[in-house]
Amino acid sequence: MSTNRTDPSQAVDLTNCDREPIHFIGAIQPIGFLLALSSDWMVSRVSANFADFFDREPKDVIGKPASTLLSPDAIHAIRNRLSLLRSPDASERIFRCSLFPESRLFDVAVHMIEGLIIIEGEPSSDHAYGDATGTVRGMIARLDNAPTIERFFNEGARQVRALTGFDRVMVYQFDETGSGAVVAETAKPGIGSFLGLHYPASDIPKQARELYKRNLLRVITDIDSEPVPIVPALNERKEPLDLSLSVLRTVSPIHIEYLRNMGVRASMSISIIVEGELWGLVACHHYSPRCPSFERRSVAELFAQMFAMRIESRERKAMVEYEHRARDISDRLLSIIASDESLLGDPMILNDIMNEAIPADGVGIWLNGNYAFAGSTPIRGGSRTSSMR
């Protein structure tokens, strides 16, 4: 199957889902709208539901200057946010913004891609969320009090569930092969547990992993909702809009089927990026439609970034402690050998010391033509030995 971006509707199934062009899917979820502006601030594309939020049909705004649509205050706010973008994958948010004259308030995400200014909006909640910084500070303080990594993961899942209200929240960690395991979970009673389950790398296709690194939060509010197409579907070069950084991008049919098979109606995932790589996900499931407010999702994303920083810090600390312990063991071994080589006659001493750094079933020592074994070791000369020879 070709992944030609000019044909995003090509059929895909479980045998070729790793080649599905999910970022060229050509539609958004109906909880908000999308507006694409050219670099000279002309309207080039809108979502087909534009009139559901404003009394303007797509055909009435495409090709028009943004100044005929957006209020001067909104254009000023968006320009200011665009000036803050520091990387190709960066996005900015504006909460409780009046985009159009006499319009209701919207929470807005702004990013740029391929020379286009992408504006996505959702109706704001009736009340502002509050002090996001203070909320995250309190959440992180609880994390820092976790004495073990297991408690740390559990606290992270619990904090996200308390913030977003999903039925199930899991911390999902990848290994070096791309396979994953649920290392922490909190869920409402009676829905079973996924804790400790392992999943193959193929569960998350390669292109989805790349998007997880670029776009840190992904929400699916209702798998049964009708996708809203982008108008026009193709530009003058016959290309669909790249929705890699979209907060409203609709869902792959394959992923919808995956969630439906689990009985999940809504989901949210937040990337955990450690040292520039996808360490894992905070995965959230709900068994009925659910749409946390844009502000709450933004707080959850900020918390996940801090969560990732704490993981990185803990892993570095563990590595430093391991290196110190290994150095100490090396010094102790050298000291034993230098002070009394006959101590090698009791290899169990060495076995105990080595196991402090490297868990092993057995240890073999070779010194000046002599050898000693302790524990489970290879067979030599037809029999296993644990004595000095």
Image (cartoon, rainbow, N blue to C red):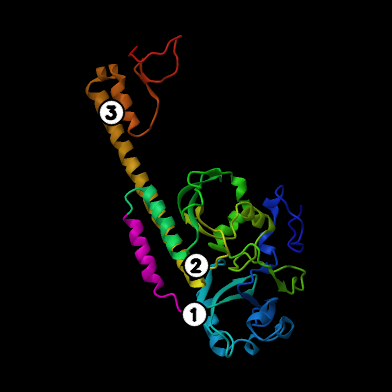
Under tag 1, what secondary structure?
Answer: loop
Q: Nearer the viewer, residue 366 or 107?
A: 107
Q: Amino acid at mark 3?
A: Leu
Residue 83 visible somewhere in the drawing: no
Q: Earlier in the sequence, mark 2 or mark 1?
A: 1
Q: Nearer the viewer, residue 187 or 352?
A: 187
Q: Nearer the viewer, residue 119 or 293?
A: 293
Q: Quadrant of residue 265?
A: bottom right
Q: Which residue is mark 2?
A: 297
Q: Main secondary structure of the magenta part?
A: helix
**Above or below, 290 relative to 280:** below
Disc number for residue 126: 1
Specify few, some or many for label 3: CA neighbours under 10 Å numbering under 14, 14-19, or 20 or more: few
Residue shown at 55%/76% (left/top)? 108
Which label lies toward us, 2 or 3? 2
State how many labels appear: 3
Disc number for residue 234: none
Residue shown at 29%/28% (left/top)? 333
What x and y, as percent, mark residue 243?
Answer: 64, 66
Specify few, some or many for label 1: CA neighbours under 10 Å numbering under 14, 14-19, or 20 or more: few
Q: Specify the segment rendered in magenta.
A: 125-145
Q: Amino acid at mark 1?
A: Asp
Under tag 2, what secondary structure?
Answer: helix
Q: Distance of mark 2 from mark 1, alpha carbons?
A: 16 Å
Q: Amino acid at mark 2?
A: Arg
Q: Which residue is mark 3?
A: 334
